[in-house]
Image (spheres, rainbow, N blue to C red):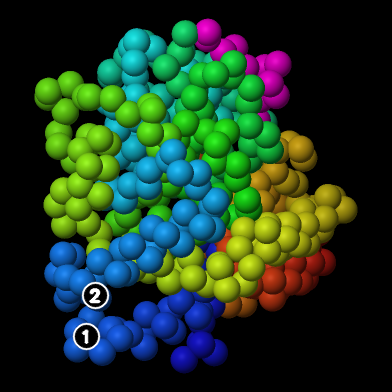
């Protein structure tokens, strides 16, 4: 079955570990003697509640989530969090947002519907190649929170430090780098992510929220957008995205069995180094982002011109690698090398890059 698989460099939904897919396949028709698939289970059944608790417990363990944080599973992807964050966490109507790419821009635009949003940094005039340094952040003293996007999936940049905010809670969209390396959760007020990259499959959003930030929401807030209510009902106010939570559990088991997030970080650094080192010595390719802000997950670069970019993408597909085309808003090439991308996939990509350079320079 596995020999026909391609190296899929998609930004998301993206590759899953083969071990996870194999286990899901094995359990597809009859989950641990229950006589049914996880897809067919009542979310209130004891079999499913075991899966749910195990998944939550594993996330807490793998990410080392402190006891004063709550884990919530929600539908609506990361985009729904763009609305939920201001709806739930704007205390005085004010919040700070750093715009480092397309998704943080969308998050800020959504928040503007609900409050007075101050933009602490906007990297659009620099093609989002850069992540602001602490000195470049124009932070407010009275913001309810600072929102950042920890990894910019489209541009291939990543925050390498947690800003100092003088007590203002940081809310981080970690959709494209969650579980890729250890994170000190206690430095954040809240972390959230869509699951379809390092956490599993689409249909699930995960939020990890510091308890003391929770407050009552306006009467008009839809029930499913109320963190407090969702937490009170342990993410089961209604039917949760049950299968996606099960897959997250399998992914977490896989990470845990390999040694956890320290090991993920080592593996990811090794993979990213292989491509970036090649890009740095090449006069043919050009990396998109500033060297000090480069993402471990999304490597973005261009060939000398658009025609060659298109040729690169076409020939890479013929060579067994898919989804290397850059996002439609920026063009070029993007190689997303999440946790599930094996080192061999990146070796194959770099060998292809070399050959392509030799044939087209
Ligand atoms: N934030 C980031 C950093 C993303 O990469 C994405 C999706 N690629 C989103 C938010 C939006 O996620 P969703 O499609 O789950 O709403």
| Relative horizontal placement of residue 320, taking residue 348 as reference (left or right) | left
Tell me if label 2 and label 1 are in contact, CB under 8 Å.
yes
Q: Is mark 2 within 8 Å of ligand 1?
A: no
Mark 2 and mark 1: span between their CA atoms? Answer: 7 Å
Quadrant of the image occupied by residue 249? bottom left
Q: Nearer the viewer, residue 248 or 317?
A: 248
Q: Residue at x 38, y 34 (%)?
A: 211
* Number of callouts: 2
Q: Residue at x 25, y 35 (%)?
A: 228
Q: Residues within 10 Å of mark 1 (few under 14, many from 20)?
A: few
Tell me the quarter of the image containing the C terminus: bottom right
Q: Nearer the viewer, residue 186 or 334?
A: 186
* Secondary element at tag 2: helix
Q: Earlier in the sequence, mark 2 or mark 1?
A: 1
Residue 50 lies, with reference to residue 125, above or below; the image says below
Residue 142 visible within the image: yes
Quadrant of the image occupied by residue 50? bottom left
Q: Residue furthest left?
A: 220
> Which residue lies under the disc numbered 2?
47
Q: Is 137 part of what is drawn in magenta?
A: yes
Can you give x and y, in whole percent of width and height, for residue 22 in the image? 44, 84
> Which residue lies under the disc numbered 1?
34
| Relative horizontal placement of residue 71, taking residue 146 as reference (left or right) | left
- Magenta range is 131-141
Can you give x and y, in whole percent of width and height, for residue 99 in the image? 52, 26
Residue 127 lies, with reference to residue 289, above or below; the image says above
């Amino acid at each position: 079955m596995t020999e026909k698989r391609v190296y899929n460099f998609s930004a998301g939904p993206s590759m899953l570990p083969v071990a996870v897919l194999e286990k899901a396949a094995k359990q597809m028709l009859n989950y641990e003697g229950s006589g049914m698939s996880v897809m067919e289970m009542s979310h209130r059944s004891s079999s499913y509640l075991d899966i749910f608790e195990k998944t939550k417990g594993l996330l807490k363990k793998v990410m080392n989530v402190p006891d004063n944080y709550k884990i919530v599973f929600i539908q609506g992807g990361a985009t729904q969090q763009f609305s939920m964050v201001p709806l739930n966490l704007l205390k005085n109507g004010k919040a700070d947002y750093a715009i480092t790419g397309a998704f943080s821009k969308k998050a800020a635009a959504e928040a503007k519907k609900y409050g007075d949003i101050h933009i602490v940094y906007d990297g659009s005039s620099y093609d989002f190649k850069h992540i602001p340094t602490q000195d470049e952040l124009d932070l407010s003293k009275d913001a309810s929170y600072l929102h950042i996007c920890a990894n910019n999936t489209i541009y291939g940049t990543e925050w390498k430090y947690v800003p100092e905010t003088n007590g203002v809670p940081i809310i981080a969209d970690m959709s494209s780098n969650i579980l890729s390396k250890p994170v000190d959760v206690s430095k954040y007020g809240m972390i959230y992510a869509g699951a379809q990259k390092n956490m599993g499959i689409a249909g699930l959003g995960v939020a990890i929220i510091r308890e003391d930030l929770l407050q009552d929401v306006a009467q008009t807030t839809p029930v499913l957008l109320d963190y407090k209510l969702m937490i009170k009902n342990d993410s089961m106010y209604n039917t949760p995205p049950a299968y996606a939570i099960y897959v997250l559990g399998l992914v977490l088991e896989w990470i845990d069995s390999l040694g956890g997030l320290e090991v993920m970080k080592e593996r990811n650094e090794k993979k990213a180094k292989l491509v970036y080192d090649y890009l740095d010595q090449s006069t043919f390719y050009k990396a998109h982002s500033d060297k000090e802000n480069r993402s471990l997950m999304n490597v973005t670069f261009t060939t000398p011109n658009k025609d060659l970019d298109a040729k690169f993408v076409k020939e890479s597909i013929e060579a067994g690698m898919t989804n290397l085309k850059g996002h439609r808003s920026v063009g070029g090439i993007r190689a997303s090398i999440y946790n599930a991308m094996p080192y061999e996939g990146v070796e194959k990509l770099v060998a292809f890059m070399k050959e392509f350079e030799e044939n087209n320079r």
